[in-house]
Image (cartoon, rainbow, N blue to C red):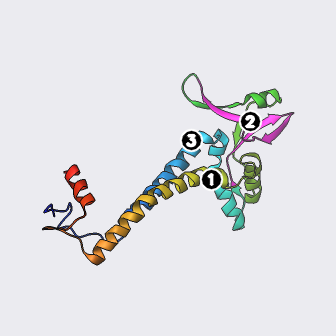
Amino acid sequence: MTNARVTGAGYWMPTKPLATMQAVTLTVLVVVLAAFAVLQFQLTYLQRFYVTSYLKSGIRARLHRPDTTYTQVRLTWKGHAVFASSDDVRQVQDAAGHPVLVLSSDAKRAGAEQPYVVTPTVPNAEMYHLIATYIYQDRGVLVFVRTPLIIGGVTLVALLAWSIPLDIRRARERRQGAHLRGAEIVSTAEFNRRVRSA
């Protein structure tokens, strides 16, 4: 027998599955951080540039809203103004440290000229189609959420493997009671474990 006082004696055990709730909250935080990392490091400059316009044009097109003014990055190719694709343009800093747009090596070899920015008023469905085709290669929202959701799923499984048994043990102790103080009959293995950890 042992007279050791159980850690946490005198405190009310939570009635909610707090460990599981914490696991879900932490998973959401991991997904948000992973989405930010994808936005900053995995996507090209134009893929980041058009995120807001992509979502806005898609929603407004489905709602049949009037034509909207959007900011577009264009370049001149064979004498014609064309919508710059995802791999045509990148952003660098000039000598003064200001961000400027420059052509990619492939775009230069193809004969394109310096990119420029315009703000035309265009139909929402047309803008959505341009961005989906030339910026995101018709991958839709998967380009944003695939990697964060995979990371979030792995994180959630790992955390639930810890949190669910903990909440089950707490629930069992709420139903059956927990030993707080006084003599307690334990097995030989449990007695030896407590003595070693003391």
Residue beneath label 1, please? 146
Q: Position of residue 163 (x, y in %)?
A: 40, 61
Q: Earlier in the sequence, mark 2 or mark 1?
A: 2
Q: Position of residue 56 (x, y in %)?
A: 64, 58
Secondary structure, mark 1, is: helix
Quadrant in which the N terminus is drawn: bottom left
Q: CA distance from mark 2 to mark 1?
A: 24 Å
Residue beneath label 3, please? 40
Q: Earlier in the sequence, mark 3 or mark 2?
A: 3
For the residues labelled 1 and 3, say whether their Cβ atoms are less than 8 Å apart.
no
Out of 179 and 106, give the one closest to the viewer: 179
Residue bounds of the magenta highlight: 69-94
The amino acid type, in three-letter code, at marker 3 is: Gln
Q: CA distance from mark 1 to mark 3?
A: 15 Å
Q: Which mark is residue 88?
A: 2
The amino acid type, in three-letter code, at marker 2 is: Asp
For the residues labelled 3 and 2, say whether their Cβ atoms are less than 8 Å apart.
no
Out of 180 and 137, give the one closest to the viewer: 180
Secondary structure, mark 2, is: loop
Q: Position of residue 184 (x, y in %)?
A: 17, 68
**Prevalent SS, magenta region:** strand
